[in-house]
Image (spheres, rainbow, N blue to C red):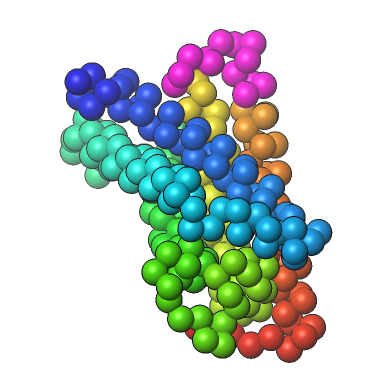
Amino acid sequence: MWLCNSSVGRKVVMSVTGLALVLFLTFHACMNVVALISADGYNTICEFLGSNWYAVVGTVALAALVVIHFLYAIMLTLQNRKARGQNRYAVTAKPEKVEWASQNMFVLGLIICLGMLLHLYNFWWNMMAAELFDLSTFGQPAPADGAGWIAQTFSCPVYFVIYLVWLCALWFHLTHGIWSGLQTLGWSGKTWFGRIKCISQIWSTIVILMFVAVAVVFFVKGFCCGGSCAI
């Protein structure tokens, strides 16, 4: 199948799965901002997206997108290494007009995946999984208390710094990934190329700033209230 065997097919799969994940991140960022406005409003969304069958199906689909995107990234990286052969050991200057993020997409993706595992532990495991498997949350916020889990997580300086590093890597990954994915899917004309790169920068920055705003606000609140790190 050409989607698996050819270089172009693999890039198409990478682009489609990547752009789908960008849409999810955009929704997730908008959802998180609600926590800054109303804890009750955010918890209502969390309850709606709790352990319902559609939430479980959505989680499985999202996990599949991440796995496919990561596996194809590995395949393309190995393919590029094989194509370069011994030349990959040569010391060369950075090519002109090649972004730093473009040269380090796999490393950035690896950092993002590691951060995602921490994120799943802090939120998915303590919220959806706790509700699904009736796990005890003694002394912890209730599974549907999303605002409580955000407050508890970002009151910890260690988690706060880790999340900022994770979001920084995610920003670099998105600024290149969005326009690169659209270019692979055909938006590569001279007229639109510059516009797409600009839109990618703006979109990525807005999405990441929404995540950062939530982290900073809840960290400051936790610091002012004397929050402690519960790792």
Q: Where is residue 99 in the image (x, y as percent from the top left)?
A: 52, 37
**Total marks drawn?**
0
Q: Can residue 201 be seen in this view?
A: yes
Relative to 107, does residue 120 appear above or below in the rendering? below
* Magenta stretch, overall SS: helix
Q: Position of residue 154 (x, y in %)?
A: 64, 73
- The residue closer to the viewer here, 219 or 36, is 36
- The residue closer to the viewer here, 74 or 147, is 147
Question: Relative to 188, is 7 on the left or the right?
Answer: left
Question: Relative to 79, is 191 on the left or the right?
Answer: right
Relative to 50, does residue 8 appear above or below in the rendering? above
- The residue closer to the viewer here, 59 or 220, is 59
Residue 225 occupies quadrant: bottom right
- Residue 188 in the magenta stretch? The answer is yes
- Residue 151 in the magenta stretch? The answer is no
Q: Is residue 90 visible?
A: no
Q: Where is residue 32 in the image (x, y as percent from the top left)?
A: 67, 56
Report the residue at 58% width, 75% height from top: 142
Image quarter hosting the N terminus? top left
Relative to 157, does residue 73 appear above or below in the rendering? above
Report the residue at 79% width, 61% height from top: 38
Q: Where is residue 76 in the image (x, y as percent from the top left)?
A: 29, 35
Segment colored magenta: 184-196
Report the residue at 49% width, 28% height from top: 180
- The residue closer to the viewer here, 36 or 109, is 36
Report the residue at 63% width, 69% height from top: 145
Residue 105 occupies quadrant: top left
